Amino acid sequence: MKKLLIVFHSMTGGARQMAEAAARGACGEPDIEVRTVRAVEAGGDDVLRADGYLFVTPENLASMAGAMKDFFDRSYYVALDRIQGRPYAALICAGSDGENAARQIARIALGWRLKPIAEPLIVCTHAQTPEAILAPKTISAADLARCEEAGAALAAGLALGIF
Ligand SMILES: Cc1cc2nc3c(=O)[nH]c(=O)nc-3n(C[C@H](O)[C@H](O)[C@H](O)COP(=O)(O)O)c2cc1C
């Protein structure tokens, strides 16, 4: 059975809801084992054990969230040259932008020689004031459906071995 690893970080709930939606989509694929792990609890061994990856992070200060970066810092050299060719996708939760976090993940994935299976999916929460940024987030049904589709597509491709 192929294994899909979903690694996420979330402070106010947006990226967590996106990761959960992606996991729901992926779980519709019977031949795929889906593991959803918080970035602070994930590491190189989880990366090595999986056949494909979904990285889900907020954009904070024009960067992926620090906890997500810490996951990559701890995992990068453990997995280097051992996971090339495996498929991945990235989901970004952003207040207004998200492009830089997406670029950073793409750069790290390129170093790992992973295969992107889709453009990064950026969900914008339109949180721009301090109050809005610190408030709990509710991701719209339409955006959750996009995340669910992303999870389903990655899982289906993994199951069929088309990546
Ligand atoms: C310290 C901090 C910095 C942020 N910087 C950015 C940013 O550079 N670009 C952006 O689009 N959103 C930025 N945001 C907004 C978050 O991306 C947004 O609130 C998102 O919903 C957070 O995801 P979460 O709900 O999973 O924590 C920032 C939020 C915080 C707390």
Image: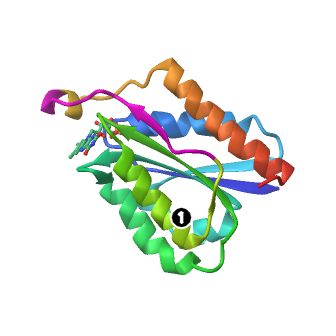
Which quadrant: the C terminus?
bottom right
Where 56 sits versus 80, above or below? above
Identify residue for label 1.
109
**x then y, percent, for residue 118:** 61, 45
Q: Is residue 35 left or right of residue 131?
A: right
Ligand 1 within 8 Å, label 1 CB: no
Q: Residue at x 43, y 73 (%)?
A: 74
Q: Residue at x 43, y 50 (%)?
A: 102
Which quadrant: the N terminus?
bottom right
Q: Which residues are magenta?
A: 118-131
Would you say residue 35 is visible in this rendering? yes
Q: Residue at x 37, y 62 (%)?
A: 69
User: Relative to the observer, which residue lies in front, 89 or 40?
Assistant: 89
Q: Residue at x 49, y 35 (%)?
A: 18
Amino acid type assigned to the residue bearing label 1 in the image: Ala
**x then y, percent, for residue 137:** 34, 28
User: Relative to the observer, which residue lies in front, 34 or 153?
Assistant: 153
**x then y, percent, for residue 155:** 73, 45
**x then y, percent, for residue 149:** 65, 32
Quadrant of the picture in which ligand 1 is shown: top left
**Quadrant in which residue 11 is drawn:** top left
User: Relative to the observer, which residue lies in front, 159 or 23?
Assistant: 159
- Is 162 within the magenta? no
**Quadrant in which residue 116 is drawn:** bottom right
Where 43 sits versus 140, above or below? below
